[in-house]
Amino acid sequence: MYPCDTGFYSAETTLEEIGKDFTKFYGLAIPEHFDKKQKRQYVRAKYATNVKFSSGNLAVQTTLVDFSAGGMMVYMVPMLVKVLRSGDDIYSSFQINNVSFNVKVRLAWIKNYDNIPYAGFEFLYLLPGVRKELEALAAAYSATST
């Protein structure tokens, strides 16, 4: 399955040709049709900005990769591991389109894509107005990035 800003898509691929060097990948045919397998609860938008994470007396800055009204993906940096291990509540501070957010978060996952570590965070206890603001910003930035 392949994630995108609106859902997860899946398709059957075929191997058209294979060579003699088994350390290389040969002849994968890209399908013409993808089926939506799961719809995202919130639209996800790519947006780069600084994010400050704080927990107790620890703080670290990293960069936002994308966001939705439900959470965000950031680049995982070594100091962020210390913040996660602190055991205290974690807050993130960031700006999108000159709108400031200070949100309590929880780690959802850590993954490597192309040997680059990323972390996903879920927003906790958002007021309805804040969630609506994030939804509107994600919809606006998602529309401009497609």
Image (cartoon, rainbow, N blue to C red):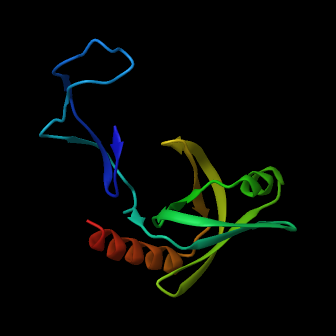
On-image quarter of the C terminus: bottom left
On the image, which quarter does residue 34 sit in? top left
Residue drawn at x 51%, y 88% as measured from the top left = 98
Can you name the residue that lies furthest to the top here?
20
Residue drawn at x 64%, y 52% as measured from the top left = 107
Can you name the residue that lies furthest to the front here?
21
Residue drawn at x 73%, y 52% as measured from the top left = 78
Is the residue 62 above or below the residue 6 in the image?
below
Number of callouts in the render? 0
Residue 50 relative to residue 135: left or right: right
Is the residue 121 above or below the residue 46 in the image?
above
Residue drawn at x 52%, y 78% as measured from the top left = 130
Q: Position of residue 104 (x, y in %)?
A: 67, 67
Is the residue 145 above or below the residue 29 in the image?
below
Observer-nearest of 125 and 40: 40
Q: Position of residue 39 (x, y in %)?
A: 32, 50
Observer-nearest of 132 and 71: 71
Can you name the residue that lies furthest to the bottom here?
98
Can you name the residue that lies furthest to the right here?
57
Is the residue 5 above or below the residue 140 in the image?
above
On the image, which quarter does residue 142 sit in? bottom left
Residue 4 relative to residue 28: left or right: right
Q: Position of residue 87 (x, y in %)?
A: 83, 53
On the image, which quarter does residue 101 sit in? bottom right
Observer-nearest of 38 and 62: 62
On-image quarter of the N terminus: top left
